[in-house]
Image: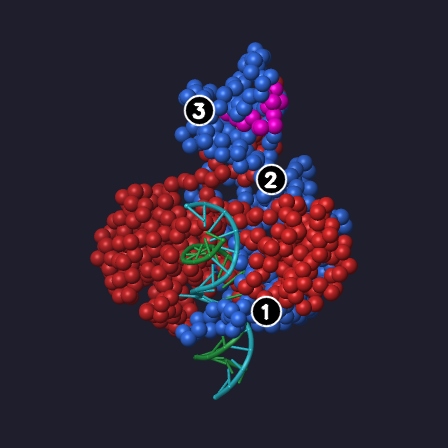
Chain colours: A red, B blue, C green, D cyan
Amino acid sequence: MILQGDCKLELKKIDNESVDLIYLDPPFFTQKKQSLKTRDNSKEYSFDDTWENISDYKYYIQDRLIECKRVLKKTGNIFLHCDRSASHHLRIALDEVFGIDNFQSEIVWSYKRWSNAKKGLLNSHQIIFFYSKTGNFKFNNIYEGYSATTNIDQIFQKRVRDENGKTKYKNNENGDFELVAEKKGVPLSDVWEIPYLNPKAKERVGYPTQKPIILLERIIEIASNEGDVVLDPFCGSGTTLVAAKLLNRKYIGIDASKDAIQLTKARLENPIKSESQLLQNGKDSYLNQDEEVIEILRQINAVPVQRNKGIDGFLRLNGAMVPIPVKIQKGSETIDEAIRYLIKACQTNNYTKKILLKTHSRQNQLLFELPAQRREEGLIIVEGIEKFHQMEESLLTF
Amino acid sequence: MILQGDCKLELKKIDNESVDLIYLDPPFFTQKKQSLKTRDNSKEYSFDDTWENISDYKYYIQDRLIECKRVLKKTGNIFLHCDRSASHHLRIALDEVFGIDNFQSEIVWSYKRWSNAKKGLLNSHQIIFFYSKTGNFKFNNIYEGYSATTNIDQIFQKRVRDENGKTKYKNNENGDFELVAEKKGVPLSDVWEIPYLNPKAKERVGYPTQKPIILLERIIEIASNEGDVVLDPFCGSGTTLVAAKLLNRKYIGIDASKDAIQLTKARLENPIKSESQLLQNGKDSYLNQDEEVIEILRQINAVPVQRNKGIDGFLRLNGAMVPIPVKIQKGSETIDEAIRYLIKACQTNNYTKKILLKTHSRQNQLLFELPAQRREEGLIIVEGIEKFHQMEESLLTF
DNA sequence: TCCAGAGATGAATCCACCC
DNA sequence: GGGGTGGATTCATCTCTGG
């Protein structure tokens, strides 16, 4: 079900205690108008969310939270996605409406993001508060694997308390240990590292602040079951509803904007979910350099580059990375091959210099001479790390 | 300088605008008395922190924050380490004392922790608020390496705006790109993954809520310079002061407890910092299993175990891990060697069963027969994955 | 001195194309 | 066709300028 209008009014159409899970991503407390055009410039979505002051904003949210509480079942849960500038006020509103005792978690959604020139730390997380309606709330535990540093042997051992009341692992009269029957794994943490929705992702529909489907899926999975009713009173582009549909939950979405409603309906008919390489393979799958190369790069104080066969790193000058690419000749490469890879990788970027660090020479390469054409292209061959350090100053001019 | 007493009074002894950096880890808002004994039970540190209600607590903190603001230089910074149950109230106190505009960051300190049986998400982060006294605050940018997925070639390119005002990378008449001079790296994020101080770390002095030195070092590095004055009005075991000393900052510590002051003084004379393997080598260094083994474990639905030469995993029954260790015979191991490793790894834990999955047999092992003694010890040799699946039901009884 | 709006920023990561 | 890599796109941005 999708409703258009202010959720304060629209929520009144929903029965008492009929919803299992609510996710809200309310407008932020900003003092300026936000807008963003879609990629093809066909549409402009904007928020005209200006409140006089923070307490107006708090009341605005609180009013709607009260309605949310009414429609929520006794076993229901609510997740409030917060704005960094007002999260503390929102939590106070939640405390007042749902009660301090029903606070369950402060979830940190952490991600990597393109940076900006801001003075200070790069802002790369958002907060989601998780409250329940009562102490008897639905929750599906998800377990993850143990950390590689965990001594898994030990956690199977039963424990006892010593004379001071501290627990220790128990061993029986033979010095052996007694075992517990089973371990389920590590419960899901409240810090979630989920990649930010990439600017180029197909999943993107051109709506500002669009959330990754996988974030909503996780919330829906832990806090509701199949067939349950999921409500999003500020549904925007409809990510929550798409996730709910994919997980076989019923859904109710509300938004004040006609455009948003239209977009949501279209998305529900054809839900697209990005298949993130990063999520599927893990970030380690991108690391393709062997330790030897990393070590040489460290010795010449270069920044390592992954994801590129022709360039292994860039040089550093006064701590900053400068556009002078370096390739380290691999054990399996002849000098000719190494040159070819490096030149190819540089062909569209006209670096004034490119450096090949020779690490070995085979019999048939002793007489190798660098062709004039290559020298013109700025290719410099350095014979080993020691030589590199001798030449370093001249190499770093460009 | 180290002062004993309530910091509200002791702070009055400090001159106006004389401190560069303040870090506070105030007592938490709990309704019960906290206490913890040292490892050898020789001493008991306790907090008698009970406030009637949250607003009493807020005023208690706010009073002290006002004094903090007075002693802080105009270029100074303050970091407030929060308790999860009161962080929102503390931030409101900070807003009131330092001003909303001087809010710089909400830092998330995230760590792995012993799990508990709590229903819901495992609570594994703490919040530190970072406020400055004015807009002109000290800040040392720290840059980190680029993500492995970043296209480093590209970020060296200059850009222009297209007709719609969107930026794109610029190429000149030849189709080549123009380059920017240098890149510094990725600014430090506001989510810090720092291992929790291990209960057995040398660094531990037996004081409750002790923080890792490295956490304090990072704060001190980004927000002050050498020779600056660092103040901790609730210095506890003195971690802040130790970190300040190690980084050549001057320090002032205040604590109400005589024991805490004594401990701090002792620590300052002989600062010990854990050399965490985890921190130095990164968590990937613990992953010592090759992909082949991981793949076999996946096929037999076992939980992989790192950090152990004799046990590669534990079996799973109905999704939960059970205490039946498995070893996968490696390509380089004879069956005898594999048995020896497995038995050795199991010697202190009397697992009723231990399983060796044979993956290959060499000529001289075709006639191998399991000695009776080994069978008594519960060792079962399974010849390959297919065989494992045939026997699975019987293997999983114990 | 303050505020609004223009202009500069900068790396993450998915997509699409190319061997 | 499948792995590799060049390219596109983003900002509930951030900073700076000018009135």
Q: Quadrant of residue A39?
A: bottom left
Give the Cα separation between the discs numbered 1 and 2. Answer: 39 Å
Residue depicted at 59% across the width and 43% down the height: B284
Dot 3 corresponds to which residue?
B386
Q: Are marks 1 and 3 in contact (CB under 8 Å)?
A: no
Dot 2 corresponds to which residue?
B286
Q: Quadrant of the N terminus of chain B?
A: bottom right
Residue B180 tag number? 1
Q: Do discs 3 and 2 share a chain?
A: yes
Look at label 2 and name its amino acid: Tyr
Residue depicted at 40% across the width and 62% down the height: A209
Q: Do discs 1 and 3 share a chain?
A: yes
Give the Cα separation between the discs numbered 1 and 3. Answer: 58 Å
Comparing B14 with A261, the one in front is: A261
Q: Badge 1, how many Cα within 10 Å: few under 14, some, many 20+?
A: few
Give percent across and percent down for residue B242.
70, 53
Residue depicted at 43% across the width and 50% down the height: A276
Give the Cα separation between the discs numbered 3 and 2. Answer: 30 Å
Chain where mark 1 sits: B
From the viewer's perspective, is B74 left or right of A88? Answer: right
Circle 3 SS class = helix
Comparing B284 with B194, the one in front is: B284
Q: Which residues are magenta?
A: B324-339
Give percent across and percent down for residue A99.
38, 52
Asked whether residue B257 is in view, the answer is: no
Give percent across and percent down for residue A102.
39, 49
Chain where mark 3 sits: B
Look at label 1 and name its amino acid: Val
From the viewer's perspective, is A44 left or right of B173? Answer: left
From the viewer's perspective, is B289 left or right of B269? Answer: left
Give percent across and percent down for residue A126.
46, 57
Residue B333 counted in the magenta span: yes
